[in-house]
Amino acid sequence: MTLTLYNTLTRRQEPFETVEPGKVKMYYCGVTVYDYCHLGHARACIVWDVVRRYLQFIGYQVRYIQNFTDIDDKILNRARVEHSSMEVVADRFIKAYFEDMARLGIKEADEYPRATHTINGIQRLIHELENKGFAYASEGDVYYAVQQFDEYGKLSGRRLEDMQAGKSDRVNVEDPEYQKKKDPFDFALWKAAKPGEPAWESPWGAGRPGWHIECSAMVRDRLGDTIDIHAGGADLIFPHHENEIAQSEAVTGKPLSLYWLHNGMVKVDGEKMSKSLGNFVTIRELLDRGVDPMAVRLFVLTAQYRTPIDFTDEAIAAATNGWHTIKEGLLFGYQYSEKLGWDLETGNIPIPSPQYPVPNPYFERFQETVNNDFNFPGGLTVLFELAKELRREGHILVHEGKTETSPDELKHQWQTLVTLAGVLGLEAEIEAETDKINGLSDAEIEAKIEQRQEARKGKNFAESDRIRDELQAEGITLIDSRDGTRWHRN
């Protein structure tokens, strides 16, 4: 069961082999902290959180670094509008980031370097690029000479010759920055200070770093010349990640990362998410609306991580229903342990690994599926199978006083579900009154919906309305459509 990953750099799926056996050095391009995180950030952070968890699950020691871009035009613009400062804006939204991620169950990275805390490393890297002929100073700015790096475009598949065709349509020759460059495709490594903006002293004069050089310096400072996984959104492939490769590899002569992994984008009702379209949804807006954070995680994990995902009311309702199914399974042990004679104090769930001594077909199926380029949707099928089986046994226990499956085997299944759900970051809160854990079960809700359908077929609309109202009182909302009736818990 070898882990294979789709590598953006090579455009093929490859066996995963690390620089150092048993260890993974992983870097995720984090957020620019000028606003609250949105659904796109939620997807990326959930995906790479679960990738890290899964690598640990199969036995790797993972060092996971995620940066904050805390100096940027957008941050400076917001500071001007608010009559504030770059530091105040950045600190506020870094704090908000941690609040939002905690609600989503995102484990903290091992370290969160900030661009403004890496100025020495940034200047050192620029100086090395300049010495090697890959950078040049111009009127207080420093630019990367793209034509000097023969492999430019190898990540994105873009060729400079193709981009140069028609460049006159995209270049403003009157732009002062354009006039400073030797080539229109050269990009800034260091920007000369502008009045009223924060700046740092440097060999090229007071100024601040360009965006791309920040990540190259932070990767090098925290993880070394070559890492195992460089992750980020697909929108970063060009120019950001392409430029990172050009900067880092021109200096070290080594691969910046063995594997480049990119998550797909999030759409809202089929449209690209943007403030101008009025469909811009922040994480806190969504969760404050009453959507369960675990349903958000499940929504993200039901799609292959590299594909686009469409956020709709129907999709989040389906994810909410799916979460309640898994949640019932996760709470099974706490709800029925006494009836089954379990001693949960001595029933700690072992942390599995490839060397786990007891054969477990669920672990094996889960790992075999997910090892195919982090196929988390396939892994979820194992969780749903376990959760539904536990739910069925719970109903039998309630109605008949005993289960079809032995208590020991049920305990094994429950422990397995809790372990695998933990790999995906799906965790249920243990409520005090176990007899009220879920109110109506999924099966009971489906039965009432079926009764309502029969009432509607018989034109007994009063009974149909009564069942709807009864479910609504239990916190269950019904949505009728041409395809049938869907439901979700409020």
Image (cartoon, grey):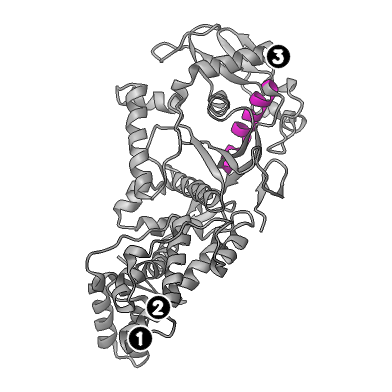
- Tell me which corner region of the image, top left, top right, bottom left or bottom right, holds residue 253: top right
Q: Is residue 243 magenta?
A: yes
Residue found at x 39% / y 64%: 320
The number of numbered discs placed on residues in the rendered structure image is: 3
Which label belongs to residue 235? Answer: none
Would residue 156 appear left or right of 353 to someone viewing this image?
Answer: right
Nearer the observer, 7 or 432: 432
Whole-percent x, y for residue 89 in the image:
34, 28
Q: Which residues are magenta?
A: 233-251
**In this rendering, would 144 be left or right of 346?**
right
Label 3 sits on residue: 132
> What residue sits right under mark 2 in the picture?
407
Q: Secondary structure at mark 1?
A: loop
Spatial separation of the CA atoms under disc 1 and disc 2? 9 Å
For residue 290: magenta? Answer: no
The picture places residue 426, in percent across and down from the top left corner, at: 42, 58
Most distant residue in the bottom direction: 458
Q: Is residue 323 left or right of residue 373?
A: left
Name the foreground residue: 465 vs 307.
307
Closer to the chain start, of discs 2 and 3, is 3
Q: How packed is label 3: few (under 14 Cα within 10 Å), some, or many (20 or more)?
A: few
Q: Is residue 482 visible?
A: no
Indicate the quadrant containing the N terminus: top left, top right, bottom left or bottom right.
Answer: bottom right
Q: Main secondary structure of the magenta part?
A: helix
Q: Quadrant of residue 274?
A: top left
Please say whether residue 168 is visible from this viewpoint. yes
Q: What amino acid is found at the position of numbered circle 1 in the picture?
A: Lys
Amino acid carrying label 2: it is Pro
Q: Nearer the viewer, residue 179 or 56?
A: 56
Q: Earlier in the sequence, mark 1 or mark 3?
A: 3
Q: Which residue is mark 1?
A: 402
